[in-house]
């Protein structure tokens, strides 16, 4: 995505992330944010969002990211998956806020 800087996004999200709401994964925040951003862009590529062929579907993206991060982080039980879901929920809100602040989102 033109104009998107992953390092800048990560720094912005780290500064705004509510670590108390997701204490387990907050300990690995830089690593997990990097995985989430990569997963988000993989979702957008797979769904055709980056090429303008479709719109970003929050529900589909949440499901895609939760499944992908769960596998990448080795979440093997309900408590671990709950932590992943909590993280993804917050990540998606932060990613949207960052992209809105940078003028990278268009609402058609």
Image (cartoon, grey):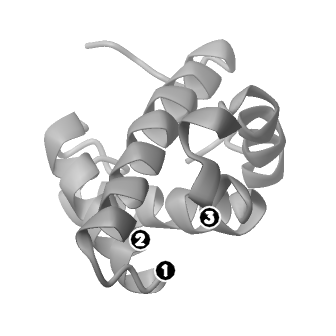
Res. 57 visible in picture? no
Quadrant location, the C terminus = top left
Contact, CB < 8 Å: mark 2 with mark 1?
yes
Residue 97 position, x and y percent, is 56, 20
Q: Residue at x 77, y 40 (%)?
A: 14
Q: Relative to 21, say whether 97 is above or below.
A: above
Q: Relative to 76, say whether 38 is above or below.
A: above
Q: Residues within 10 Å of mark 3 (few under 14, many from 20)?
A: many
Q: Real-space Cα distance between discs 2 and 1?
A: 6 Å
Q: Residue at x 33, y 64 (%)?
A: 79
Q: Residues within 10 Å of mark 2 (few under 14, many from 20)?
A: many
On the image, numbered disc 3 is attached to which residue?
32
Nearer-N-terminus badge (2/3): 3
Residue 99 position, x and y percent, is 58, 26
Contact, CB < 8 Å: mark 2 with mark 3?
yes
Q: Quadrant of residue 56?
A: top left
On the image, numbered disc 1 is attached to which residue?
73
Residue 38 position, x and y percent, is 53, 66
Contact, CB < 8 Å: mark 3 with mark 1?
yes
Q: Real-space Cα distance between discs 3 and 1?
A: 8 Å
Q: Residue at x 47, y 48 (%)?
A: 87
Numbered disc 3: secondary structure = helix
In the displayed structure, does residue 95 sit left or right of residue 79?
Answer: right
In the displayed structure, does residue 19 sit left or right of residue 87?
Answer: right
Report the disc number at residue 69: 2
């Amino acid at each position: 995505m033109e104009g998107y800087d992953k390092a800048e996004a990560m720094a912005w999200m780290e500064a705004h992330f509510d670590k108390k709401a997701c204490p387990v994964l907050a300990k690995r925040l830089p690593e997990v944010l990097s995985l989430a951003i990569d997963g988000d862009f993989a979702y957008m590529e797979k769904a055709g969002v980056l090429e303008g062929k479709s719109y970003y579907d929050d529900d589909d993206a949440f499901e895609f990211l939760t499944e992908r991060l769960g596998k990448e982080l080795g979440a093997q039980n309900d408590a671990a998956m709950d932590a992943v879901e909590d993280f993804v929920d917050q990540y998606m809100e932060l990613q949207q806020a960052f992209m809105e602040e940078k003028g990278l989102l268009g609402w058609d």
